[in-house]
Image (cartoon, rainbow, N blue to C red):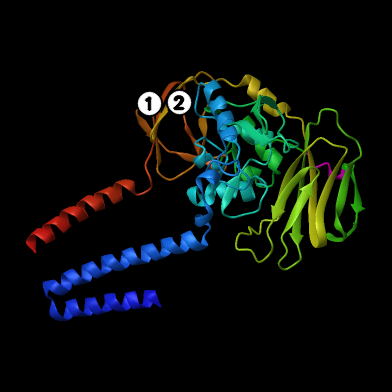
Amino acid sequence: MGVFLFMLLILTLAIGFVWSGGKVWYFCLHAGALLISLGIANIAQYAIFEHGGVKQVSDEYLNSEDYNGEEQRDLLQKIENQESGSLYRIDWKVRSLNNTPIVQDFNGTSAYSSILNQHLLYLYLYDLNIDMGRESVSRYATLGNRANLYSLFQGKYMMRKKSHTANIPYGFEKMLSSEHYRVFENTNILPFVRTTDRVFSEESLEKANALEREHAMLEGVIVEDAPSTTTEIPDVPNIIHQTSVETVGAAFKNNKLSVQEKKGGIDLVIDDPDAETKDYFVRFHLENLAESQGFTLKVNDYKTKRKHNQSVYKTYVDDLVIRVPKADKISIRVPKGNYILKDLGLFRESYQTLETVQEEASKTEDINWGGNKLTITHNNKNKDRYMMLPIPYERGWQVVVNNTRQPLEQVNYAFLGFPITDGINNIQLRYYPPFFKLSLLLTIVSTILAILVIRKA
């Protein structure tokens, strides 16, 4: 009702101004618009304060372990104190607060999706099927405890409560500890700057599984449109035929899972465990047939929450890939109900590819990132074709190599890459928001025109 009255007042003032054309009506119209804008802003602020939970926020909460605790900040500071660089990432967030990296001021692995772009969302949902522990279209979190991805994307540290350390990725070793938390360090981290002459086209990997795509990113680079320079696609076979499927508190037939107990599902019992296997990657398609029942999926010790079918945050991406530390069997558990469970797959990971790439990697020492400018000096002794950086691909990036502007490409599904030349490469990357220069020009022109109009009036 209040908004309607505001609009009626503005309309009345506008009609009066058009009808009379007098200066009094002109100033009344502008004053009314300003006062109404302030009124609407204050009403919105009041509604958020009273009904949005802001009223309950206190200094005590803002400095508690539920938001930004001192013990957490102390560990983060210890990490920073021992680091010589600033390009590493820390996998840590308080509860389900994806803005923890912003609140606690560190480079993290979680954010709300409005900050980032479609390419990164598709990387999680479709390209690599990265489970975030909580289904949602509005947030990113973690890298699914998948060691290859942490190494590729500068995930060097992980901080967890001591009671939540069962699923630490392979290659992470305990580094720091406090009363309630532990910090783990990735011993297989790859350089921030990587180069390669092995190119895989996205088309050549269209039918590849998630682990084969990870290996392609380790061995070379995946480019959207470029032709492949190799026909040797990484091969990680599906060993689901080497397992026995057993039901627990459920019936499973013709891709339909009916759980009769409070919790139930299936066990994949590995018939012939391999001594070199470190992790298993289990793949499946899972749909809940209940109309409005969210549920928690548990795969061995790993838990992830799935939205109900009416939720506006549901992704409707039901193809899942879950990393599981080596075990004799893999247990898939869901609450009582009816589900579609199909496309089962199981893949071994020994991390030989990751460890080989890490041992052979050469580090580019001369990297400087300040503001919107990143400079790199790289000696391309191996005559590689591409440089790839773990920076999300965004419109607005520009790259100059040896004083020549080069095309920026979207590589590894969601990140920056570009061609390089033999020998020394002096590289400058700059980022401006899309349409920044055009918007700046329009702002200047509009301001000048406004000044001229006012002076003339």
Based on the displayed image, in which of its 4 quarters is residue 335 positioned? bottom right
Taking depth in this image into account, of 33 and 296 the one nearest to the observer is 33
In the rendered image, which residue does mark 1 sit on? 402
Q: Under tag 2, what secondary structure? A: loop
- Please say if 79 is above or below 258: above
| Amino acid marked by disc 2 | Thr
Query: How many neighbours does mark 2 have within 10 angstroms: few (below 14), some (14-19), or many (20 or more)?
Result: some
- Please say if 335 is above or below 388: below
In the rendered image, the quadrant that contains the C terminus is bottom left
In the rendered image, which residue does mark 2 sit on? 421
* Left or right for 45, reference 349: left
Please give the name of the residue rendered at 78% of the width and 53% of the height, measured from the top-left corner: 343
* Left or right for 41, reference 75: left
Q: Which residues fall within the magenta stretch?
A: 237-241
Taking depth in this image into account, of 2 and 405 the one nearest to the observer is 2
Q: Under tag 1, what secondary structure? A: loop
- Please say if 154 is above or below 82: below
Q: Are marks 1 and 2 in contact (CB under 8 Å)?
A: yes
Q: Position of residue 245 (x, y in %)?
A: 90, 49
Query: How many neighbours does mark 1 have within 10 angstroms: few (below 14), some (14-19), or many (20 or more)?
Result: some
Could you tell which of marks 1 and 2 lies nearer the N-terminus?
Answer: 1
